[in-house]
């Protein structure tokens, strides 16, 4: 048992070496990269939200688009009224 556990004890009591420093460097580099990616995604989401809000606000204030939607809604309501009238005629 002492033979099997001696490398573990030797590693625990030895000072930090080159491998330990390289391992720590790789681990912190990976963690930093992950944090940067998350930050970039958050910033992209904020920018997209601001742009979309501005675009839709501008569209909602646009008279031409409002008039077009009103015209289309009016046509749809006319078609619904005509369809209802035809159904009522067919029932008689």
Image: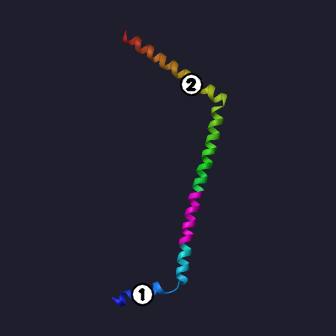
Picture coordinates of residue 76 (x, y %)?
52, 22
Farthest residue, direction top: 92
Split into 4 quadrants, where in the image is the N terminus? bottom left
SS at badge 1:
helix
Q: Is residue 36 magenta?
A: yes
Residue visible at 66% across and 28% down in the picture: 64
Picture coordinates of residue 91 (x, y %)?
37, 12
Q: Which residue is mark 2?
A: 72
Per the model, the C-alpha gap separating discs 2 and 1 is: 81 Å
Secondary structure mostly seen in magenta is: helix
Q: Is the residue marked by circle 1 packed among few (<14), some (14-19), or many (20+) residues within 10 Å?
A: few
Q: Is residue 55 above or below residue 27?
A: above
Farthest residue, direction bottom: 3
Q: Which numbered tag is attached to residue 88?
A: none
Q: Which residue is mark 1?
A: 7
Residue visible at 42% across and 85% down in the picture: 8
Picture coordinates of residue 29 (x, y %)?
57, 70
SS at badge 2:
helix
Disc on the earlier residue, 2 or 1: 1
Q: Give the colour scheme shown.
A: rainbow
Q: Is residue 46 magenta?
A: no
Q: Which residues are magenta?
A: 27-39
Split into 4 quadrants, where in the image is the C terminus? top left
């Amino acid at each position: 048992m002492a033979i099997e556990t001696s490398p573990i004890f030797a590693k625990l009591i030895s000072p930090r070496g080159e491998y330990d420093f390289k391992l720590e460097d790789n681990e912190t580099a990976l963690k930093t990269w992950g944090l940067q990616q998350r930050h970039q995604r958050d910033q992209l989401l904020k920018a997209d939200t601001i742009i979309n809000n501005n675009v839709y606000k501008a569209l909602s204030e646009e008279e031409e688009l409002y008039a077009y939607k009103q015209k289309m809604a009016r046509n749809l309501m006319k078609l619904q009224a005509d369809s209802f009238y035809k159904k009522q005629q067919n029932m008689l």
